[in-house]
Amino acid sequence: MTSPPADRVVLVTGGSRGIGRAICTALASPGTTVYFNYHNHTEAAETTAAAIRQAGGKAFYDSVDVASPDAVTAYIQHILKEAGRIDVLVNNAGVTRDGLLVRMKDADWDAVMDTNLKGAFNCMRAVGKAMMKQRYGRIVNITSVVGVSGNAGQANYAAAKAGIIGLTKAVAQELASRNITVNAVAPGYILTDMTQDLGDAAKTALIDQIPLGRIGTPEDVAGVVAFLVSPAGDYMTGQVIHVSGGMYM
Ligand code: NDP
């Protein structure tokens, strides 16, 4: 048996907005318990919780900084105590602090590495033992097309997202024998708060690079995550799935 129980327990990081909210909603269904964390935006988290409940799932949310190993460990211990298991982990929380290399401040490098890359490490390390004991787990790490292609002005972000790909493949190899799959999803240009400040000229230039000719939606990404953690994805691990309208091939 490789599939989870019908009453599966899901944890999504950065679920209050954007892609994380769409993932929480896509994974919610009657019987599913969706835990998600966020950092600052409590009102947005309440909106996500309402969407989960609307889809029939149970919703629990907390403000937990994924960059803090202690906070993540305590949070995941709390979920395991309350729910008894974690079947699905989606490492989605992320930030950008864009700037050219020669002007990049240490704080901008550190914030992006600590949230995007170390955050995913913190969460996987904290759930790893429980998933190994369960002999079941589905982990999806949200990377980015720029983790593969690079992007001027995003040395910190591209490095963190490239790191997530290596991390995904290493952990996939470590955990495969316990029926735990670990995959990465690499979105291209998705319309969320993270990208909304791009000027019209930059948006048009980006769309010109997308063979499918449109900006992606959070739901475009969430559908692929839902597939990877469904029984249809049971035989996939260590993969990087691009959801970018063909922006990178
Ligand atoms: P948003 O900025 O819309 O949302 C980011 C989410 O991460 C929020 O829920 C935010 O919480 C949470 N978050 C940020 N920092 C922390 C932290 N330290 N601890 C816990 N939670 C935190 O981003 P997107 O939805 O656009 O991006 C989601 C993921 O997809 C990110 O990993 C991003 O890098 C990746 N991605 C996005 C692309 C895009 O085009 N949008 C393209 C490729 C990848 P709060 O609301 O409290 O701030």
Image (cartoon, rainbow, N blue to C red):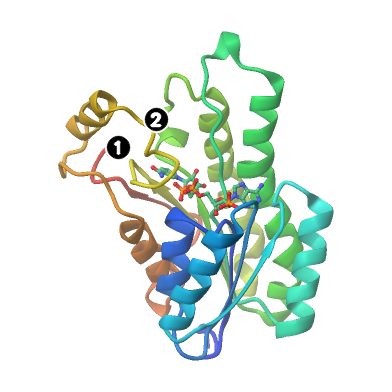
Residue with the mark numbered 1: 248
Residue 249 in the image: state x and y as whole percent: 27, 39
> Left of 47 or right of it: where is 135?
right
Kindly indicate the quadrant of the structure image that contains residue 58: bottom right
The residue under the point 52% across, 73% down is 49
The residue under the point 34% across, 42% down is 188
The one nearer the camera, 236 or 47, is: 47
The residue under the point 20% across, 29% down is 204
Label tally? 2
Q: What crowding class fits label 1: few (fewer than 14 Cα within 10 Å), some (14-19), or many (20 or more)? A: some
Q: CA distance from mark 1 to mark 2?
A: 8 Å
Residue 11 in the image: state x and y as whole percent: 60, 69
Residue farthest to the top? 102
Residue 164 in the image: state x and y as whole percent: 57, 44
Question: Does the image show residue 203?
Answer: yes
> Left of 201 or right of it: where is 163?
right
The one nearer the camera, 100 or 49, is: 49
- Identify residue type, mark 1: Tyr
Kindly indicate the quadrant of the structure image that contains residue 199: top left
The one nearer the camera, 67 or 8, is: 67
Question: Does the image show residue 139?
Answer: no
**Is label 1 in a helix, a strand or a loop?**
loop
Q: What crowding class fits label 2: few (fewer than 14 Cα within 10 Å), some (14-19), or many (20 or more)? A: few
**Is label 2 in a helix, a strand or a loop?**
helix
Residue with the mark numbered 2: 149
Residue 244 in the image: state x and y as whole percent: 30, 45
Label 1–label 2 contact, CB within 8 A: yes
- Identify residue type, mark 2: Ser
Residue 50's tag is: none
Q: Earlier in the sequence, mark 1 or mark 2?
A: 2
Position of residue 173 relative to residue 248, above or below, is below
Kindly indicate the quadrant of the structure image that contains residue 208: top left
